[in-house]
Amino acid sequence: MATIRIPTSRQGQTGMGQGGWASHELVRAVGQPATVALRSAIPLEVDLDVVHAGDEVWHLVDPAAPDTIILEASRWEADYATTPAVSIDEAARAREQFQITAETHPAPHCCSCGFHDASLNVHAGPLGDGRWATPFRVPSSLPDSQRHERSGIDEGLLWMAMDCACGWYTSHDGGERRGVTVQFAVSIYEEIELDTDYALVAWNGDYQPHWDGRKRGAAAALFNRTGDCVAQSRSFWVAPR
């Protein structure tokens, strides 16, 4: 049984762990490709247990409340929608359409899309073709940008960026409506390099392009400067009642 601790520097909604980063940590602990269901709020600065629940399913739980599943990972074979490449310049122009301010941001302390010095500034805006985009870069100066043996950077930084990019797409494309991630999966095909610009794109993927009641799906893709897709994600969202 492994233990995961989500630091305050990896929060999303104020006072809660960022779902994309926490999902990455769970999949890394599991050690095999998995899709993650987000079941309940992710506590910060608490030692959380990874429990093998059987049949290639793993739960992340707080030992103080073991009956409450925080995240659930299950093995899956990657299946992603594709989209044409977007240049970094196009992504930068899309980000200029980002209308949220520090005063109106629903999660201003988010380590991915918040307004503070350590934020990755994942501020996706509309491309005008139904997709949303933003430049993505992990600066070497980013505080505690953790390094792992398998990769030059903490790949969880990309997981949380893809989560936030899809969040801006689902909550603003077609009208403003807040949603929360309930299912998330990411595959990374090439090492993400520090101090390197990428274009991060979010769209409906192979889901229908609008809300279906309280449900909506999204996809994301990361393109390098030559237009190669180096990472993909699939996510599902639900609007609170």
Image (cartoon, grey):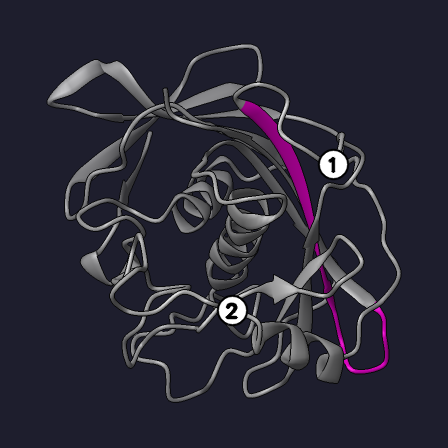
Q: Which mark is residue 110?
A: none
Q: Where residue 49 sits: x, y (%)?
A: 27, 30
Residue type, mark 1 in image: Pro
Identified by mark 2, the residue type is Phe
On-image quarter of the C terminus: top left
Residue ID at (66%, 40%): 218
The disc at residue 98 is 2
Q: In which quarter of the view is residue 10 placed? A: bottom left
Q: In the rendered view, does 154 fall on the left or right side of 102?
A: right
Q: Are marks 1 and 2 in contact (CB under 8 Å)?
A: no
**Residue 62 position (above or below residue 100):** above
Residue 159 seen from this side: yes
- In this rendering, the count of numbered labels is 2
Q: Position of residue 108 (x, y in %)?
A: 27, 62
Pick the residue in front: 75 or 222.
222
Q: Earlier in the sequence, mark 1 or mark 2?
A: 2
Distance (Cα) linking label 1 and label 2: 20 Å
Q: Relative to residue 196, is residue 78 depicted above or below?
A: above
Residue in the foreground of this view, choosing between 202 and 234: 202
Please give the residue where the numbered disc 1 appears in the rendered image: 209
Q: Viewed as shown, does residue 123 lie left or right of 13?
A: right
User: Quick check: is 225 in the magenta stretch?
Assistant: yes
Q: Main secondary structure of the magenta part?
A: strand
Q: Is residue 69 above or below residue 107?
A: above
* Residue at the image position 22 percent from the left and 55 percent from the top: 7
Residue 24 in the image, given as x and y percentages of width and height? 48, 47
| Residue 76 on image: x %, y % | 69, 27
Magenta range? 215-228
> Which quadrant does the N terminus fall into?
top left
Describe residue 211's horizontal placement relative to residue 120 as left or right.
right
Alpha-carbon neighbours of circle 1 within 10 Å: few (<14), some, or many (≥20)? Answer: some
